[in-house]
Amino acid sequence: MSTPRIHIVTLGVSDLPRSRQFYEACGWTASSASNENIVFLKGGAGVLALYGRDALAEDALAEDLPTGFAAVTLARNASSKEEVDHWFAAAVAAGARELKTPQEAFWGGYSGYLADPDGHLWEFAFNPYFVFDEHGNLALPD
């Protein structure tokens, strides 16, 4: 059996060109596999995909319901507080809505939250207890 992995996270978006522009402004790079229906963004060991919200619901045979807070966040971990501040400012400048300004966290790190143009929540964080491997991936303890 293979090791469990998340290979692709797909976000349903209301305006694919706007979302692509937002994520590219935040430093992601679109793959040439992208087309007018889907965007694949390279990010280390995983891929972030952007797909029309209606089409994603249809493909999953799911009803597209407004969710408000969906109890899911995505996270981008940094190697310093300054890096968190940099990414956070770049995302806000690209159109993100600030929810929680980066600040010292109760668990000993530093983090802030924002929402992308479709309301998907992102946490930008520095966790002094996490280390990165030689490829820039989180290396969690066993």
Image (tube, helix red, strand yellow):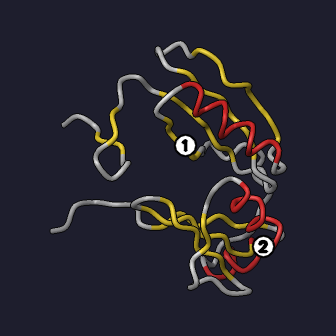
Give residue 55's position: percent from left, percent from top.
72, 80
**Residue sitting at 62 percent across and 72 percent down?**
30
**Which disc number belongs to residue 16?**
2
Which quarter of the figure has residue 16? bottom right
Which mark is first along the chain, 1 or 2?
Answer: 2
**Residue sitting at 59 percent across and 27 percent down?**
82
Name the residue tied to disc 1: 75
**Residue sitting at 18 percent across and 37 percent down?**
142
Q: Residue furthest left?
A: 1
Residue type at mark 1 is Ala
Give residue 77's position: percent from left, percent from top.
50, 38
Q: Is residue 16 left or right of residue 110?
A: right
Measured in 3D between alpha carbons, the distance from the residue under mark 2 to the one under mark 1, in whole angstroms, is 21 Å
Is 124 rendered above or below residue 137?
above
Is 67 rendered above or below residue 123?
below
Residue type at mark 2 is Leu
Between 31 and 70, the one lying in front of the other is 31
Give residue 116's position: percent from left, percent from top.
75, 50
Between 85 and 138, the one lying in front of the other is 85
